[in-house]
Image: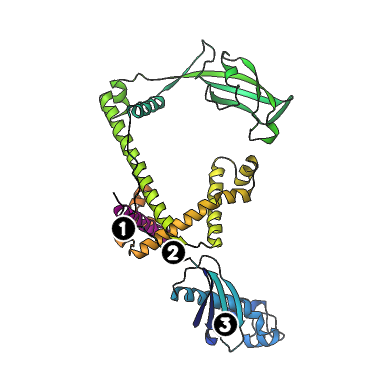
Amino acid sequence: MSVKIEKIEKNVVKLEIEVDAQVFDQCMDKAFSKNRARFNIPGFRKGKAPRSLVERYYGEQVLYEDAINYACADAYDKAVEENDLHPVDRPEIDIVQIGSGKPLIFTATVTVKPEVELGEYKGLEVAKEPVVVTEEDVEDELKRIVERNSKLVSVEDRPVANGDIVNIDYVGSVDGVPFKGGEAKGYNLTIGSGTFIPGFEDQLIGANLNDEVEVNVRFPEDYHAEELKGKAAVFKVKINEIKFKQLPEVNDEFASDVSEFETLEEFKADIRKKLTEQAQARADRKYEEELVKKAVDNATVDIPDVMVERRLDEMMRHFDLQLRYQGMNLETYAKMMGTDMEKIRADYRESALEDIKTQLVLEKIAEAENIIATPEEYDAELEQMASRYNQPVEEMKKHLHDDDIEYIKDSIERRKTIKLLVENAKE
């Protein structure tokens, strides 16, 4: 096999590949074996005629399609590997020469990973975000913990008040006609949460248990359902249950109940410590992100459209999956937001470009600095993964594909590259 490479334009190369006549003949044999049962030659049982007779009867061209697939796939993969090319799309194949006893010659035009011209990535200067945890932060976190440990207490001797949680049945209508999504039974609504249309929750205040209340509201002009925007609606609401949150008293006893500490002061000190650690982690991430952004901005790279489109495809699939967990899909979301798929893709395009450029620049820095994932680091990463999933390492290894292994190694190298940027940044 011989290969000639021609650079057509930025990031696009054309390979002219010559496959030996003997190798191509072997591919013709494979094509014949695959298809022989299709051929019906007089004097032979179906599928029993030799290849030479089939070619004379039908013409050798009848085997070309499969033979080309066999020959081109192997030859192209070898050419890419031997010439250290990194395609980012499927090749466009054109046959230059084909025929019995001749070498197969074909061209493969393909977009390859772009070259990155690194700018300054050492000695970068980024302001570090100060880590400050105030007494108010500690008190706010303590309030959240108190809320989580509250109890719901049923109310029967008073009407609904702000902050109560009411269980309701309701049916909504516009001009006397019920509308889609306007009915529910056994719905828990926190009064004052602003969950429902403005005015709905306020009109339940003062109602008693088992009361049936008529609530009059108007949908906002920017409401997500087009057919309900600005419309007046009537809801018939039945109060099934009234509850309120009973908060525990915040004292040493509470601290010992919800933590390992005996006193409230010790518990608050631990809250401060954890909040400080979290704030430090956020500040460190932001600092790393800013350093990476500077290194990426300093680099030059011409990203092919096909890479952007593929990244957008991944982002759309991920977004669609998130939406499905919420009971809708991307198409429904687009209609609800008054947009379409093309507009959504356009909105994500800049983010896709930034993602790809960041990936390429970090890969180039890793290459320039000889950063690799060592076998020890890879094994340690697998140990951590196995521990997270509560699975033996050897069992996890059985289920890893080549792409998974590559992803793990890339993740290690990315972290090490970012660490290099941090260690070489200006203080």
- Please tell me whether mark 1 or mark 2 is closer to you in this view: 2
Specify start and end residues of the magenta stretch as a single range. Answer: 401-427
Between the C-alphas of marks 1 and 2, the distance is: 27 Å
Question: Which comes sooner in the sequence, label 2 or label 3?
Answer: 3
Question: Which comes sooner in the sequence, label 1 or label 3?
Answer: 3
Image location of residue 70, percent across then percent down = 55, 76
Q: Of the residues shown, which amino acid type is indicated by label 1?
A: Glu
Which element is circle 1 on?
helix
Say which residue label 2 marks: 116
Using the rendered image of the protein, determine whether residue 422 is visible from the camera's viewpoint.
Answer: yes
Looking at this view, name the residue that lies furthest to the top. Answer: 157
Between the C-alphas of marks 1 and 3, the distance is: 44 Å
Between the C-alphas of marks 2 and 3, the distance is: 32 Å
Q: Relative to 97, say whether 110 is above or below.
A: above
Say which residue label 3 marks: 105
Q: Is residue 27 left or right of residue 364?
A: right
Residue placed most toward the observer, 48 or 26: 26
Q: Principal SS element in the magenta part?
A: helix
Residue at horizontal 47 percent and vertical 68 percent from the top = 86
Image location of residue 220, percent across then percent down = 64, 29
Image location of residue 4, percent across then percent down = 51, 80
Q: Of the residues shown, which amino acid type is indicated by label 3?
A: Ile
